[in-house]
């Protein structure tokens, strides 16, 4: 299902990868293969081991990241497979503001004595370097979710290599269109394909990508043994979404940058966090009440968790009990979609006013 067109640009690859052969009567799109079993004697044999629709998705995402991809049932299933590479009792260095589901998984593993977790400020490269001593794995999110701290991936990967530490990068926020962690020295890339990769808020799926054949084999073994596999239809939808990832990201990033410019300096906003790239920004308001009023007041945008869809969504992250206590109560994460910027601007500004966010307005509440 690969092309023979040589090196293609990412936006072209997104459109062309994972298609059936260019021959008469082949469909343009890969079929959704609904089969639990296959005629014996081939490579696949059984529906838990492989599926041609997964393969089409894997060819496309692997091509974009520059490695071999394996599709998983969800982002957390991909994360679990990566953590499972750590030997019993091994140390995992992790951003203290990592995705809360990642931190929850690590807490669970640590409580059972399976691993030791070493939380760090991932933006503080010296702190990370020191923590790498004796570690088995370092986890990177660039940027972190939702604090949006930026890691020096090249420096961390170089230090990790010197210490024999496995480097895993959760590339869900940047996507291979903005960052390619394998090029920066990461051993494994993990994705929640639920987000920007599929891009339409209609799929829960994950993926891992690596260049290392041995790691690929180990991760494939875990997927086959543990059965954290996606449905063929989800793989099809994720691939269809992936076709327009470069376009959606370009527009969403443009919108996000323009919103940062327009909302910056608004009296209700205590802090506006944006890493300089991508479609996610975090608006810090005075307190939980103001933030709750803000997300309740939007009319075009939707108050919902998750991110990376064509539509703009937002939520106050501390409404989740698992979110790190160092994340401000008033932090609202905004996933910027591809709507017209004027409509987004009007909706968000109107909601800020409605939240009582004028200068001094928030002080009157307390
Ligand atoms: C959502 C998310 C995950 C988990 O992915 P699911 O598909 O929800 O299982 C992991 N990492 C990041 C950065 C995420 O945003």
Image (spheres, grey):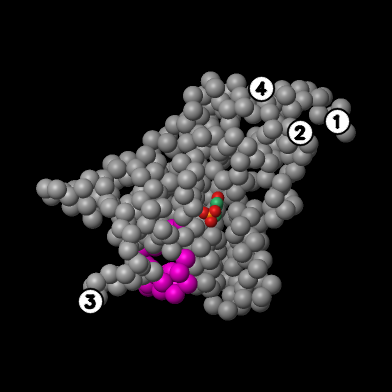
What is the CA distance from the residue labelled 3 to the residue labelled 4?
63 Å
Q: CA distance from mark 4 to mark 1?
A: 19 Å
Q: Which residue is mark 2?
A: 290
Q: Position of residue 59 (x, y in %)?
A: 31, 56
For the question of whether residue 338 can be seen, the reply is yes
Question: Which numbered disc, 4 or 1, marks the residue that appears first in the sequence?
Answer: 4
Residue at 82% x, 24% y is 360
Position of residue 271 measured from the top left corner of the image (x, y, whole percent) = 69, 35
Question: In the image, what residue occupies the spot 76% across and 33% down?
Answer: 290
* Label 1 or label 3, whichever comes before in sequence order: 3
96 drawn magenta: no
Q: Secondary structure at mark 3?
A: loop
What residue is disc 4 on? Answer: 350
Q: Are marks 2 and 1 in contact (CB under 8 Å)?
A: yes
In this view of the protein, which residue sits in the foreground, 176 or 317?
317
Q: CA distance from mark 1 to mark 3?
A: 71 Å
- Asked if residue 161 lies left or right of residue 291, the reply is left
Query: What range of the chain is rendered magenta?
Result: 206-228
**Residue 97: image location, x then y, percent:** 64, 53
Identify the mark nearer the N-term, 3 or 4. Answer: 3
Q: Provide the residue designation for mark 3.
A: 41
Q: Nearer the viewer, residue 112 or 43?
A: 43
């Amino acid at each position: 299902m690969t092309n023979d067109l040589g090196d293609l640009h990412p936006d072209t690859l997104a459109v062309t990868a994972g298609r059936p052969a260019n021959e008469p009567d082949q469909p343009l799109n890969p079929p959704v293969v609904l089969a639990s079993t296959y005629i014996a004697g081939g490579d696949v044999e059984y529906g838990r081991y492989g599926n041609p629709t997964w393969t089409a998705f894997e060819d496309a995402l692997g091509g974009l990241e520059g490695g071999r991809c394996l599709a998983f049932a969800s982002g957390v299933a991909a994360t679990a497979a990566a953590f499972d590479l750590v030997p019993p009792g091994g140390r995992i260095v992790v951003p203290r503001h990592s995705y809360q589901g990642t931190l929850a998984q690590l807490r669970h593993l640590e409580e059972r004595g399976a691993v030791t977790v070493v939380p760090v400020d991932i933006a503080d490269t010296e702190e990370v370097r020191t923590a790498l001593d004796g570690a088995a794995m370092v986890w990177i999110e660039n940027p972190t979710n939702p604090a949006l701290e930026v890691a020096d991936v090249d420096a961390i990967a170089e230090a990790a290599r010197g210490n024999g530490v496995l480097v895993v990068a959760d590339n869900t926020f940047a996507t291979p269109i903005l960052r390619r962690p394998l090029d920066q020295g990461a051993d494994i890339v993990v994705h929640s394909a639920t987000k920007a990769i599929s891009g339409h808020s209609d799929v829960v799926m994950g993926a891992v990508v690596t260049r290392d054949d041995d790691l690929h084999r180990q991760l494939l073994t875990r997927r086959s043994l543990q059965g954290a596999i996606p449905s063929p239809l989800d793989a099809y939808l994720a691939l269809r979404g992936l076709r327009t990832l470069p376009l959606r990201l370009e527009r969403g990033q443009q919108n996000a940058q323009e919103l940062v410019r327009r909302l910056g300096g608004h009296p209700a906003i205590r802090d506006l966090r944006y890493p300089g790239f991508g479609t996610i920004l975090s608006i810090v308001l005075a307190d939980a009440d103001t933030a709750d009023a803000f997300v309740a007041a939007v009319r075009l945008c939707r108050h919902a968790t998750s991110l990376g869809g064509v539509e703009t969504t937002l939520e106050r992250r501390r409404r989740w009990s698992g979110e790190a206590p160092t994340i401000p109560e008033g932090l609202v994460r905004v996933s910027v979609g591809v709507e017209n910027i004027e409509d987004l601007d009007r909706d968000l500004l109107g909601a800020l006013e409605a939240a009582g966010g004028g200068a001094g307005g928030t002080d009157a509440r307390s």
